[in-house]
Structures are given as structure tokens and as C-alpha cells.
Amino acid sequence: AQKITQTQPGMFVQEKEAVTLDCTYDTSDQSYGLFWYKQPSSGEMIFLIYQGSYDEQNATEGRYSLNFQKARKSANLVISASQLGDSAMYFCAMRDALGGGYQKVTFGIGTKLQVIP
Amino acid sequence: AAGVIQSPRHLIKEKRETATLKCYPIPRHDTVYWYQQGPGQDPQFLISFYEKMQSDKGSIPDRFSAQQFSDYHSELNMSSLELGDSALYFCASSLLRGNSGNTIYFGEGSWLTVV
């Protein structure tokens, strides 16, 4: 079963507007973490924001916020005041707990965001 | 702040050759991960190490092997290269112990092209 689902292959947003990138996840673990990464065309994987499963507050990092709805198993990324430099591929990822406490990250297929001037 | 360092950044090899990628995790991080990202694909987990011991194995071909050394750097060895091995290879590191153990940081990746 797909652990991370990103249903928007591509999105457009007008510069200075806000945009929401969707992410749903599936896990039976009680302790897990959710991440968003940005991958520009140059290829590097840039960490944006993290939400722990026990965190009661939604995570925020500058213009990025994570809309965490645990019951719905969703972790949408909200980018406020989009900038041209936000054009990139965005990956939602989840960290599962394994036996012994070692944890790996599973990625969704990504959403390509294009910001229009 | 120091980040995850990967080398080489770009590598071109012929089929059936061998390639070695190196990764230097963020200092004091105890966990290293290797991922493979094919063109237009999401990153696929290959293998991870915790405190120099292999901790998990993903979709890593038998032709590939990896290890983590006493100084915590890691190497991914790929033999009998195939055209399909052409991809961006990421190393990532995290600190599982302690309050900052939640974030996983990636290196800039190593582009491998097999011709």
C-alpha cells in the first residue's frame, strides 16, 4: 500500500499568492514524523518543515506551514506569498519507526509547483 | 553549519564498470541513509546505517554494497553497472538520539550516468 500519497502531479500559482500542496499518509505506527522537501531543477533536496505525530501545534517555518490533520492522516504544505524561486518539485515524506528505533523516510511521488509572474 | 557532503557530484561510467560514491554526514549525526532517484521519480530508499551498523535495507540491488566507517563517513559501491543505474544518488544523515533527531538532511546528491 502507498504510504505517502500526493495527488497533484503539477500545480500553478500566481506570484505572491498562497498555495496548498496536498499530502496524505498511511501508517499504523503511533510515533512518526512527516517532512516536506523541496527539489529545484538543480537536484538538491532541501528540507523545509517537519511535523511530529505527537506535536499538537502545526509546524511553521517562515513562509511554510504544515496543516496537520491527524485524524484524516493528512499533512498539507502551505506556502504563503509565493515567490518565483519557489518553482520546484515538492516531496512529502514520512518517517516510520522500525524495530530498534531505526527510522527511514518514505517519499511521495512529488508535486511540481510552478510560480507564475 | 556543516551539511552532508557527497562526492563526486558527477560521475560518468561505462556499462559493467564499478563506481564508488562517498558521503560525509553532518558531524555527530549517528544515522546515514542512501537513496536513489531515477529521472522523474521519487527517491527510493536503498540502505541505512546506525552507528556504523546496517540498520535497514531497501530496494538495493545485490550488485550494490555500502558500509559506514569508523569516522562515520559512508561509501556506496556499485558494480557491474547497468544503464538503468543512471540516477541521482542521495546520502542523508540524522541524529536519532536527542531532541534534534527528527530532521533528516540530504546532501546535494551525486549524479551517476552510465553509458
Image (tube, coloured by chain):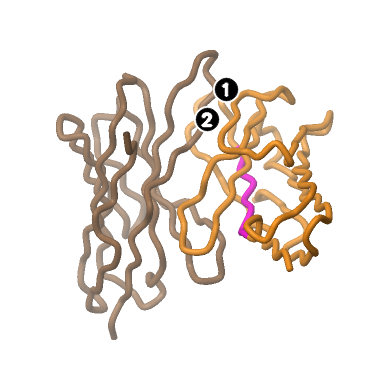
Chain colours: A brown, B orange
Residue drawn at x 77%, y 32% is B68
Residue drawn at x 57%, y 38% is B59
Residue annotated with mark 2: B101
| Residue A87 or residue B46, whichever sits in front | B46
Residue B108 seen in the figure: no
Q: Quadrant of residue B73?
A: top right
Task: Provide the residue span drawn in magenta.
Answer: B87-93
Q: Is residue A22 left or right of residue A89?
A: left
Measure the alpha-carbon separation of dots 1 and 2. 6 Å
| Residue B31 or residue A105, whichever sits in front | A105
Check disc 2 and report its element: helix, strand or loop. Answer: loop
Q: Dot 1 surroundings within 10 Å: few (below 14), some, or many (20 or more)?
A: few
* Residue B30 to residue A115: above or below: above
Disc 1 + disc 2, Cβ < 8 Å: yes
Instruction: State the quadrant of the C terminus of chain B.
Output: bottom right
Residue A5 seen in the figure: yes
